[in-house]
Amino acid sequence: MEEILNILLDGGRNVVTALAGLVFPAALALILAILFKGKTWLADLRRAMPEMRLTLKIVVFNVLVTGPMLVITMTAFHQWLVNLGLTLFEPGDWDGLPKWLVMFTAVFICDFFSYWRHRLDHMPLLWPAHAVHHSDTHVTWITSARWHPINLLTVRGLVGSAMLLVGFPVYALVFNSMLRGLYGYFIHMDLPWTYGKWGQYFVSPAMHRWHHSAEEKAFDKNFGEFFCIFDKTFGTFYLPGPCDGPLGVSDDIAPTLRSQILYAFSPRAYGGVIRRWVAPAKKAEETVL
């Protein structure tokens, strides 16, 4: 009985900690909306509230259920990789460089890993899980925390393991994690900012909003999370201006916690895969012919 009580208490503390971590981005999003969206901010917030409540349910589910399993799985996986001798550097190897350079390098390298992880999430096998993140039809700051458990495995597992294998010191990993988390909330905010000429170098809220667009011309674009260089290098950069069109996916995912979690395990999820990849490819082939 005492063990069960401790588990419940730990779960409760984890939920409180997770929700407390949402306070700052929520406050920042509200202030920016009031300052830059004028009279429409309240109406926009009301329209987005149903999706935001659903995202909060997903966050709580991941804290209570997914988090512990993810820690156990990834600890074992990383130890297995270390035992194979796959680490490229040791944390001490970075001691001769200025800390600011090590932190910048960590952010840059992580963005490279994240770019390719993100592209993998858009491939047919992983798309049904990643579609949960894209199913938000009113993308707001909290959409950054809307992840299917399988998708969390790729986000935290693949990229996290890759960063550890590179051997960055702890301070660089912590800095990268904090910066990436905060910036993730920011680029999901409902703001029309393109950054002007700087939008060619850094991912803006407008650029990432195009990534969530329901318009076919924007499909599978803008995978970067911080820098634009990888999208530009690999031909996935798309920023014609602010994104004012519809958002979301064609996948038929009901706006309930149960449907969001079970969708990736349902055969019908792969109908969405067919609609998203096979149909456009067939259309392109017919156009060429």
Image (tube, rainbow, N blue to C red):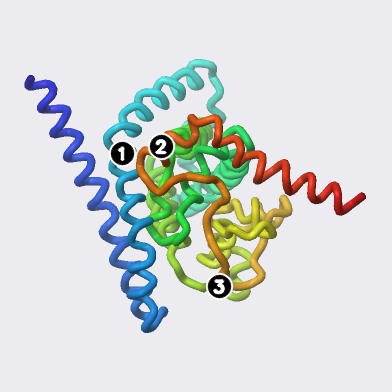
Amino acid beneath label 2: Ile
Helix, strand or loop at label 3? It is loop
- Residue located at (7% from left, 20% from top): 1
Q: Residue placed farthest to the right in the image? A: 289
Marks 3 and 2, the one that precedes in the sequence: 3
What's the distance in space between the residues labelled 3 and 2, CA to CA?
A: 35 Å
Secondary structure at badge 1 equals helix
Q: Residue at x 41, y 20 (%)?
A: 76
Which residue is drawn at the image coordinates 36% and 83% (left, top)? 39
Dots 1, 3 in contact, CB < 8 A: no
Closer-to-camera residue (93/214): 214
Disc 1 residue type?
Phe
Q: Amino acid at mark 3?
A: Tyr
Which callout, 1 or 3, points at the residue further toward the start of the chain?
1
Q: What mark, if any, has residue 61 been given in the picture?
A: 1
Q: Residues within 10 Å of mark 3 (few under 14, many from 20)?
A: some
Q: Are marks 1 and 2 in contact (CB under 8 Å)?
A: yes
Which of pointers 3 and 2 indicates the residue nearer the eye?
A: 2
Residue 206: where, in percent of width, then height?
54, 67
Which residue in the protein does label 2 denote?
261
* SS for dot 2: helix
Find out whether the residues at labels 3 and 2 contact each other: C-beta distance under 8 Å.
no
Whether residue 106 sits left or right of residue 210 in the image: it is left
Q: Is residue 158 above or below residue 196?
A: above
Which is more foreground, mark 1 or mark 3?
1
Q: Earlier in the sequence, mark 1 or mark 2?
A: 1
Left of 114 or right of it: where is 145?
left
The number of numbered discs placed on residues in the rendered structure image is: 3
* Residue assigned mark 3: 195
Percent from the top left, x then y, of residue 230?
65, 52
